[in-house]
Amino acid sequence: MKFAVIVFPGSNCDRDMLYAITDALQEEAHFVWHSESDLSSYDAILLPGGFSYGDYLRSGAMSSTSPIMRAVKEEAGKGKPVLGVCNGFQILLEAGLLPGAMLANENLSFICRNIPVRVEQNDTLFTNAFDQKEDIILPIAHGDGNYYCDDATYQSLVEHDQIVFTYPSNPNGSVHDIAGICNEQGNVLGMMPHPERAVEALLGSTDGLKIFQSILTNWREAHVLNT
Ligand SMILES: NC(=O)CC[C@H](N)C(=O)O
């Protein structure tokens, strides 16, 4: 399976993301600079964390207009997996690929620590390796992780099973404890916690690896086992 890791000016989790795929998952991954415009040769697209464009204007706002985002939308429309982590989630929100917006953390501080994250939906292509309602440990590292959406959007997220991760103990004020959501089709996921920082025991948790393994299992079922 071939993964693209999109690199924006100011991304800083891009190498961790590449390492998670090549060394931990043992699959193929390549950096793709944000000014590129074609992602058709990739099977999955990863938007890593960081401070793209220094978080100026709003986190993710400037990156959401990068040329590569047209290609991300195109491939997402074909049903390919798109995963945005932290700043990647912020970019997906600003690009309109996911509903809602990100606000500054309630305590106005940058928070960096390992926390429990609850898997609310294990029947997605990103979470099939987990148990339903399983609590896992993942690192968070953000200043703008306070997810917000209005009531109508929240009802729609609930109705379509789009709330994939929540915080059992909310660290940032996020509405309804939301830590990660997917689109209605289920192939675009944005999450604030960092799975790429939890892919081997040395890092304190291997729970993040299961997200990448889920993507791989889903892809193999569709592309390898049936051929
Ligand atoms: N680790 C990250 O991706 C940081 C995200 C973002 N720029 C913030 O601090 O909110």
Image (cartoon, rainbow, N blue to C red):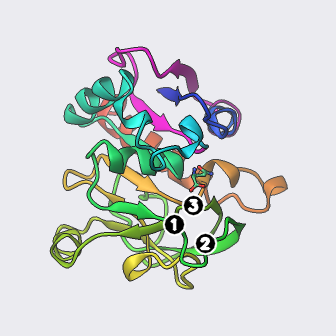
Packing grade of label 1 (10 A; few <14, some 14-19, many >=20) is some
Regarding residue 168, the answer to whether it shows in the image is yes
Q: Please say if 64 is above or below 136.
A: above
Which is more toward the observer, 177 or 51? 51
Tag 1: amino acid: Ala
Packing grade of label 2 (10 A; few <14, some 14-19, many >=20) is few
Which residue occupies 71% across, 33% down? 23
**x then y, percent, for residue 128:** 41, 58
Quarter of the image for residue 115 reads: bottom right
Q: Please say if 45 is above or below 91.
A: above
How far is mark 2 from mark 3, CA to CA? Answer: 18 Å
Packing grade of label 3 (10 A; few <14, some 14-19, many >=20) is many
Quarter of the image for residue 52 reads: top right
Which residue occupies 35% across, 15% down? 37
Q: What secondary structure is found at the residue carrying circle 3?
A: loop
Marks 3 and 1 in Cβ contact (< 8 Å)? no
**x then y, percent, for residue 211:** 51, 52
Sequence order check: which comes first, mark 3 or mark 1?
1
Marks 1 and 2 in Cβ contact (< 8 Å)? yes
For the record, the magenta segment spans 22-50
Q: Is residue 1 magenta?
A: no
Residue to which mark 3 is pinned: 193
Tag 3: amino acid: Pro
Residue to which mark 2 is pinned: 108
Q: What secondary structure is found at the residue carrying circle 2?
A: loop
How far is mark 3 from mark 1, CA to CA? Answer: 15 Å
Residue to which mark 1 is pinned: 104
Which is more toward the observer, 221 or 108? 108
